[in-house]
Image (cartoon, rainbow, N blue to C red):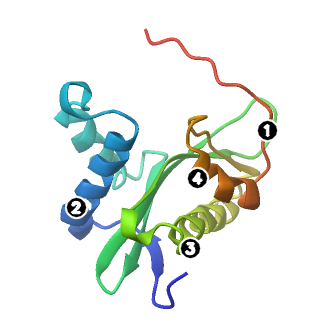
Amino acid sequence: MPLNLIIRPVTQQDYDQWLPLWDGYNAFYGRSGDTALAPEITQTTWARFFDINEPVHALVAELDGKLLGLTHYIFHRSTTSLTTNCYLQDLFTTQNSRGKGVARALINGVYEKAKLAGSGRVYWQTHETNATAMLLYDKVADKSGFVVYRKLI
């Protein structure tokens, strides 16, 4: 991890640097061009980070005033625990910062926020083709063995 890397909550002033990261994340998962997210989704997502009534949060990785990565996470209740769970929904770093500890630092930042919030678990999913990311994930978490099913309605 770069020595001066700061993991911190996103601020309103970060929008111009956050947006290209968000766009890069969505492009990575094929949400660009004709399949891009509607602008209202991006605007609503951004607004949720600053709404105290929302369980959606964001951290960014900053080095020398430049954002190198983001992570978005959500706290929610569970039927199998008295504590909340924390779902790490999005994680993305710039191409140039990959392999330098930025993603690990962001994941650890979510772990810290979850612990402070009293959550009993942090979990996430990734696409089965995201082999590079899984090399890191296998080091910082345990595979649950669950398979995700979904139906868009």
- Say which residue label 1 marks: 144
- Say which residue label 2 marks: 15
- Say which residue label 4 marks: 133
Image point (18%, 63%), residue name: 16
Identify the secondary structure beneath mark 2.
Answer: helix
* Quadrant (top left/top right/bottom left/bottom right) for the C terminus: top left
Task: Indicate which disc, 4 or 1, sits on the residue closer to the N terminus.
Answer: 4
* In this view, the mark in front (4 or 2): 4
Residue type of the residue flagged with mark 3? Gly
Residue 52's disc number:
none
Image point (19%, 25%), residue name: 34
- Say which residue label 3 marks: 101
Image point (31%, 41%), residue name: 27
Work out how far the residue at label 4 is from the one at label 1, CA to CA, in angstroms. 16 Å
Work out how far the residue at label 2 is from the one at label 1, CA to CA, in angstroms. 34 Å
Q: Quadrant of residue 130?
A: top right
Image point (56%, 16%), residue name: 150
Relative to residue 142, is residue 98 drawn left or right? left
Relative to residue 18, is residue 139 drawn left or right? right
Work out how far the residue at label 4 is from the one at label 2, CA to CA, in angstroms. 25 Å
Work out how far the residue at label 3 is from the one at label 4, CA to CA, in angstroms. 12 Å
Whether the residues at callouts 3 and 2 have beta carbons within 8 Å, the answer is no
- 20 and 53: which one is in front? 20
